[in-house]
Image (cartoon, helix red, strand yellow):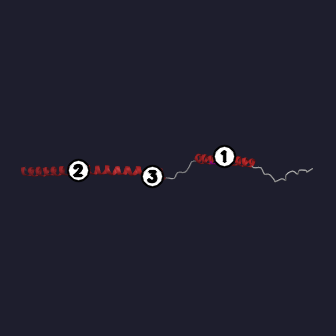
Amino acid sequence: QTKENEIETATKDQDVKYKNKESTELDKAVAETSSDRAGVQEELDAALDYLSKLHAQCDERADTYEERKARFEAEIAGLKEALQILESETALVQRGTRRHLRSAAPHKLVA
């Protein structure tokens, strides 16, 4: 029975050695994987940030009714102002030019 105890103790000691070694290797693997994940996460965050900036610049968005209405009203106001300017200039041009027909000079009576 003493021999069996020695064999069992030796076996268990070897098991403890291998388990400790395996545990150390797994801890190293976890540390490497964690650092790799952190690097990949940083890259992902940068890519997502860039993507959101691209969406802000490139995505077409539909104007709201209020924006379209305001733009339309501004355009109408500008056209009315242009029409008023053109009408006033036309009136000035018409007042400035007088059309004269050539008329014969009054006849002088020679006495």
Q: Residue furthest right?
A: 111
- Front position in the image: 110 or 3: 110
Please tell me the numbered disc located at residue 28.
2
Q: Nearer the viewer, mark 3 or mark 1?
A: 1
Does dot 3 land on a helix, a strand or a loop?
A: helix
Judge whether residue 8 is colored magenta. Answer: no
Q: Residue furthest left?
A: 2
- Mark 3 surroundings: few (<14), some (14-19) or many (≥20) residues within 10 A: few
Q: Where is residue 43 in the image (x, y as percent from the top left)?
A: 35, 51
Q: In the rendering, at what x and y percent does residue 11 appear?
A: 13, 52
Q: Which region of the structure is painted magenta?
A: 75-80
**Label 1 is placed on what type of residue?**
Glu
Which residue position is annotated with label 1?
A: 81
Instruction: Tell me what residue is drawn at x 18 percent, y 49 percent.
Output: 20
Question: For mark 1, does the 10 Å Cα neighbourhood hold few (<14), some (14 to 19), or many (20 or more) residues?
Answer: few
Q: Residue 54 carries which label?
A: 3
106 or 64, which lies in front? 106
Residue lying at 66% horizontally and 46% vertically, measured from the top left: 81
Q: Which of 95 and 55 is in front in this view?
A: 95
Q: In the rendered structure, which disc, 2 or 1, sits on the residue that comes first in sequence?
A: 2
Helix, strand or loop for disc 1: helix
